[in-house]
Image (cartoon, rainbow, N blue to C red):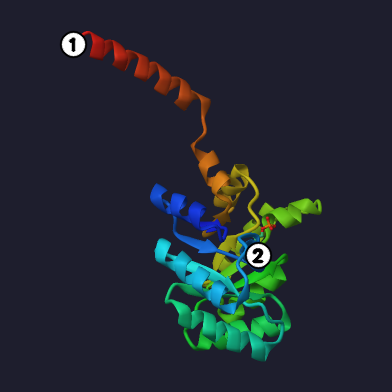
Amino acid sequence: MKFFLDTANLQQIKEAQELGVLDGVTTNPSLMAKEGVKGEDEIRNHYKQICEIVDGDVSAEVLSMTYDEMVKEGEELAALHPQITVKLPCTKDGIRAVKYFADKGVKTNCTLVFSVGQALLAAKAGAKYVSPFVGRLDDICSDGVALIEQIVNVYNYYGFETQVLAASIRHTQHIIQCMEAGADVSTCPLNAILGLLKHPLTDQGLEAFMKDAEKMKSEK
Ligand code: G3P
């Protein structure tokens, strides 16, 4: 399973890249706004900086709502860097735009997906990634991980190549659950990835090893 970082924070992206386990980055307008990125030039420059830090795909979301505008904006975003993946909402215009870009060989990420029907349309249109929002479904007392499993089963049954990118991951356990459900990618906050490292037996074991290491050093 690939790990993407779900942030536009350059420092966090650098930290995850240095860890050596980062496969890509996803952003959205809320994450970009959180970093104080404003105006067309700053936005584009920020995407370029992200692409220079990571080796994998970087999702850049369109800010427009209509097909014609999405195509224009998506083409401009895709031209910024070969790692850019055009992120499009799962609406009627968005699905049309996914198909347009698929026919041109441009990578897309179909976002704001909350049902298996939406995921089916994204795959049929040729999206490289589909982004079901796990946490936001859990927020409304629905089962986000169950949706991941359902989409994975349908895609496997029909042989769709679209990768299931579990989004809206809120904590470490979500990553484990999405992995068990067969997600191809989890896009996560950095803390959720770092949470995978935590185990009290690792800490206790290391402390004991270090004490014994000290003894060995002093016995030299
Ligand atoms: O990029 C989409 C996404 O992961 C949103 O997460 O936490 O705002 O529901 P969240």
Q: Is mark 2 within 8 Å of ligand 1?
A: no
The answer to which quarter of the image holds residue 87 is: bottom right
The answer to which quarter of the image holds residue 63 is: bottom right
Image point 57% across, 53% down: which residue? 188
Task: Say which element carries label 1.
Answer: loop
Q: Is residue 129 above or below residue 133?
A: below
Q: Is residue 62 left or right of residue 19?
A: right
Image point 65% across, 88% down: which residue? 69
Q: Is residue 172 above or below residue 200?
A: below
Closer to the observer: label 1 or label 2? 2
Image point 42% across, 19% down: which residue? 207
The answer to which quarter of the image holds residue 67 is: bottom right
Q: Looking at the image, do the residues carrying marks 1 and 2 touch, with CB atoms under 8 Å apart?
A: no
Label 1 CA crowd tier, 10 Å (few <14, some 14–19, many 20+): few
Q: Which of the two residues, 152 or 157, is positioned nearer the viewer here?
A: 152
Residue at numbered disc 2: 33
Q: Which of the two residues, 104 or 76, is positioned nearer the viewer here?
A: 76
How far across and how far down the image is residue 104, in percent? 49, 88
Task: Say which element carries label 2.
Answer: helix
Label 2 CA crowd tier, 10 Å (few <14, some 14–19, many 20+): few
Write down which quadrant ligand 1 falls in. bottom right
Image point 60% across, 88% down: which residue? 71
How far across and how far down the image is residue 186, in percent? 55, 56
Gap in Å between the C-alphas at discs 1 and 2? 57 Å
Residue at numbered disc 1: 220
The kind of residue on which mark 1 rests is: Lys
Q: Earlier in the sequence, mark 1 or mark 2?
A: 2
The kind of residue on which mark 2 rests is: Ala
How far across and how far down the image is residue 78, in percent? 50, 80
Position of the C terminus by quadrant = top left
